[in-house]
Amino acid sequence: MAGVTRQFLLVLGVALGVAPPFAVARAQGVNPAIAASETRVSLGVTASGYTYRESGGVDRESGVLPGFSAGVSRLGPALGMRDIYTGVVYDFAGGALGYQGYLQGGAGAPRPYDQSDSARFNHVEVQLGAAVPLGRAISVLPFVAIGYQSWSRNVGGGSGYGSFYHAVLAGVGAKLDYAASGRLVLSAAAEGLAVLGGGVSAPALGLSGGFGTSGEEEVRLGADWRLDNVWHVFAGLEMRHFNYAGSKPSNGVYEPTSGTFAARGEMGVTFGFR
């Protein structure tokens, strides 16, 4: 009986030691520095490294593309609930990627091509979630996300062919925010998304096909520094991987399964609002 009593007192002591700080954090809400870093209009410049590979290694593309990012988000009370997060994020990258593969346009059999192509990537997401304080300086923000991404490219210029890839995204994610000080907020985030309703079109090849469902994963690290009551600067690093499931043959041509890895660095400014 004495042993059971000691165990009960130990559990009670742990609960009393942990629960009150968590309860106090919940009652006080998200740290003001975190709320300020998540309530903003942002604009940044980016550099993204892409690696694309088709199954069987037929076509490979890689390179670093310049681009920009833009977004708007808010963390605060909404619909009678506190610490609700809403956000829209968009990024663009475009330029020349190194291409190793085959040209399929024009007359005759496909011929080897080892130069570059013109590529443009678009990615947009809408996110909705709620922040949960874990302490005075830290909070976790689970969210749901829906989005869209596209990739257009031209291989071989006028004698080659253009193609357009697109897909809808839907999934969940979570972000951990840490207020290192009243001005500096550090963050880490991860997402798991389903790639839905995707497809590819290449008019010069007579190809138009849909993809099956596949997956996309993202991880991000970020830092936000408050300059004054309105302006912030930020920097971030993101790694993203996704697959396209490939298409069925169309006019004797089909899109094989493929995988894409992208690493993006960004820095920019934000305008805060409450």
Image (spheres, rainbow, N blue to C red):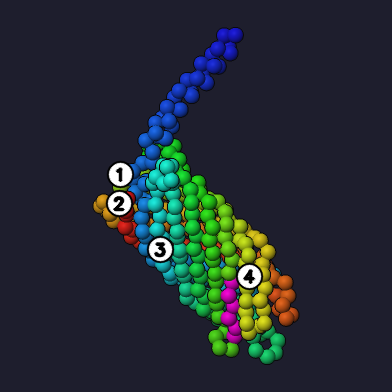
Q: Earlier in the sequence, mark 1 or mark 4?
A: 1
Label annotation for residue 226: 2
> Magenta span: helix, strand or loop, mainly?
strand
**Foreground residue among 114 and 124:** 124
Based on the displayed image, in which of its 4 quarters is residue 258 positioned? bottom right
Q: Earlier in the sequence, mark 1 or mark 3?
A: 3
Residue that mark 3 sits on: 70
Q: Which residues are magenta?
A: 160-165
Give, as a three-letter code, the residue at label 2.
Answer: Arg
Q: Is residue 162 magenta?
A: yes
Residue that mark 4 sits on: 199
Q: In this picture, is 151 found above or below 194?
A: below
Mark 3 secondary-structure assignment: strand
Disc 1 vs disc 4: Cβ atoms closer than 8 Å? no
Label annotation for residue 182: 1
Whether residue 98 can be seen here: no
11 to the left or right of 272: right
